[in-house]
Image (cartoon, grey):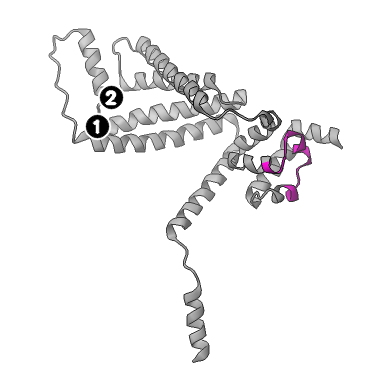
Amino acid sequence: MEQGKQGVMAVKLIPQQNPIEQIQARFKELETGFKAWLSKQSLPVEVAMVTLTSSAQGAAIGALMGTLTNDKSSPLPTPPPQANPQAMASFQQAQALAGGPLAQARNFAVITGVNAGISCLMKRLRGKEDVQSSMVAAFGSGAMFSLVSGMGAPNQPANAITSGLFFALVQGGLFKLGEKFSKPPPAEDVFYDKTRSMLYKLGLQDYEKNFRKGLLTDSTLPLLTDSALRDVRIPPGPRLLILDHVQRDPEIKDRQGNVR
């Protein structure tokens, strides 16, 4: 009997894990694994996957917004057949912006997908994310949105360029505004350029602060070891990805040979 009671007490003392925390941890694990897998793929595969996943997210958001606003918005009146082309173009623009769940899902999918895809492409090609890359991505998403939604018919190409320029100017302004009010980077940032680029490629940018705390600058990349990464409290999975990248990066390998 005493052993049975002790067993019951032991079971009761075992803390039950929060199912929400379990789901969040599992989702984070899958997200990290997906980013790590994506960073090892070729440029076309990475751009395609980023575009598809961002389009799916945008479609879900657009469908939700279209569902919430569809019941509250009054249907647009049908213009008379003898309406002039300018009035018809304005009506088509209003239809594109005030459509139902399917139309909004399409619009958001195009905007987010194209923007994310071009941003990924520019980041891989240029190795950085700046206002030029942001404006190019915004131009592409604005132009594609105009073409897909049918805005500006019958002169769609010209309107696509106009919409792209508008999106690009807005995005560029927001980017510069964010830079103005954001905290300026510290002077020692120049010592972490290669490190930051590596971590972003691997989807591990959250661990940049760990490198800074351990003073693991760009010059230490060829000398990185598992114990050094463990000392700055980087988990085993990200440690393996970082060390694998260091071994495969030709520039770091050349520097490693020079150090030795």
Residue depicted at x 29% and y 35%? 65
| Along the viewing direction, whichever of 203 and 209 lies nearer the viewer | 209
Report how many numbered discs are placed on residues in the image.
2
Q: Nearer the viewer, mark 2 or mark 1?
A: 2
Query: Considering only vertical position in the picture, is 172 above or below 31?
Result: above
| Residue 218 picture location, percent across and down | 73, 34
Query: Considering only vertical position in the picture, is 241 above or below 55?
Result: below
- The rendered magenta stretch, by its main secondary structure, is classed as helix
Q: Could you tell me the amino acid type at mark 1? A: Gly
- Place residue 39 in its image quadrant: top right
| Residue 163 picture location, percent across and down | 37, 16
| Along the viewing direction, whichever of 187 and 125 lies nearer the viewer | 187
Mark carried by residue 100: 1
Left or right of residue 230, residue 73 in this image:
left
Q: CA distance from mark 2 to mark 1?
A: 9 Å
Residue depicted at x 64% and y 47%? 238
Tell me, yes or no, whether the highlighted magenta stretch contains residue 63. Answer: no
Mark carried by residue 97: 2
Query: Considering only vertical position in the picture, is 24 above or below 202?
Result: below
Circles 2 and 1 in contact, beta carbons < 8 Å: no
| Along the viewing direction, whichever of 62 and 43 lies nearer the viewer | 62
| Residue 118 picture location, percent across and down | 50, 25
Q: Is residue 7 visible?
A: yes
| Residues rendered magenta in the picture | 213-228
Q: Could you tell me the amino acid type at mark 2? A: Leu
- Place residue 152 in its image quadrant: top left
Left or right of residue 119, residue 221 in this image:
right
- Residue at disc 1, secondary structure: loop
Q: Is residue 40 visible?
A: no
